[in-house]
Image (cartoon, rainbow, N blue to C red):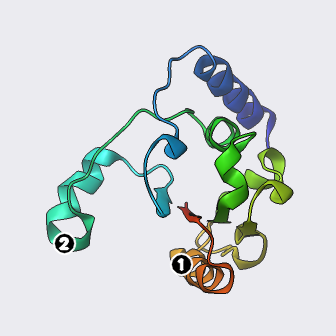
């Protein structure tokens, strides 16, 4: 990461520590949590009528304003993490999460990165999430898309 990128991240983290966030994902009921990282709720809401499975699109205040802050505030030290499997395209997981704290942590970005797209293809995350759910049958499953 460049110095400018690092400075930007540190600035976001400093601001984030001063904001009053509201909703940790574990405060809600779910079996599968689909994280569409950086997806704007207003844009998702605008296409929702075209996809019946989306239903009503809600927005809640997160526990972090950046991936690093969200990962730390959602998972670190939370008692539900040990019963949760996570499949992720988010490259911050190796810096902020402890794989031993999860029922399973599959960091898809480590082996399915697409240089041309500059990210992990959604299909790779989906395929691994389905496989992991079938193999491990976790109490909770997070599929984190970028």
Residue 98 % position (x, y): 83, 52
Q: Residue at x 37, y 37 (%)?
A: 60
Using the rendered image of the protein, determine whether residue 51 is visible from the camera's viewpoint: no
Res. 126 mark: 1
Q: Residue at x 44, y 45 (%)?
A: 28
Mark 2 or mark 1, earlier in chain: 2
Dividing the picture into quadrants, the one containing residue 4 is: top right
Residue 37 % position (x, y): 51, 53
Looking at the figure, which quarter contains the N terminus?
A: top right
- Reading the image, the residue beneath label 2 is 52
Q: In the image, is 22 to the left or to the right of 71? A: left
Residue 135 in the image: above or below residue 77: below
Res. 88 mark: none
Looking at the figure, which quarter contains the C terminus?
A: bottom right
Query: What is the CA distance from the residue labelled 2 to the residue labelled 1?
Result: 19 Å
Q: In the image, is 41 to the left or to the right of 3? A: left
Using the rendered image of the protein, determine whether residue 44 is visible from the camera's viewpoint: yes
> Mark 2 falls on what kind of element?
helix
Residue 22 in the image: above or below residue 102: above
């Amino acid at each position: 990461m460049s110095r400018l990128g690092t400075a930007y991240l540190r600035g976001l983290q400093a601001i984030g520590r001063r904001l009053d966030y509201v909703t940790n994902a574990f405060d809600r009921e779910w079996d599968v949590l689909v994280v569409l990282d950086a997806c704007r709720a207003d844009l998702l809401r605008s296409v929702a009528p075209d996809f019946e499975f989306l239903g009503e699109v809600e927005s809640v205040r997160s526990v972090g304003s950046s991936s690093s802050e969200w990962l730390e505030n959602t998972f670190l030290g939370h008692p539900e993490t040990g019963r949760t499997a996570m499949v992720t395209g988010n490259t911050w997981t190796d810096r902020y999460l402890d794989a031993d704290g999860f029922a399973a942590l599959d960091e898809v970005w480590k082996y399915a990165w697409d240089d041309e797209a500059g990210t992990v293809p959604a299909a790779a995350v989906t395929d691994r999430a389905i496989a992991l759910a079938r193999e491990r049958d976790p109490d909770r499953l997070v599929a984190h898309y970028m």
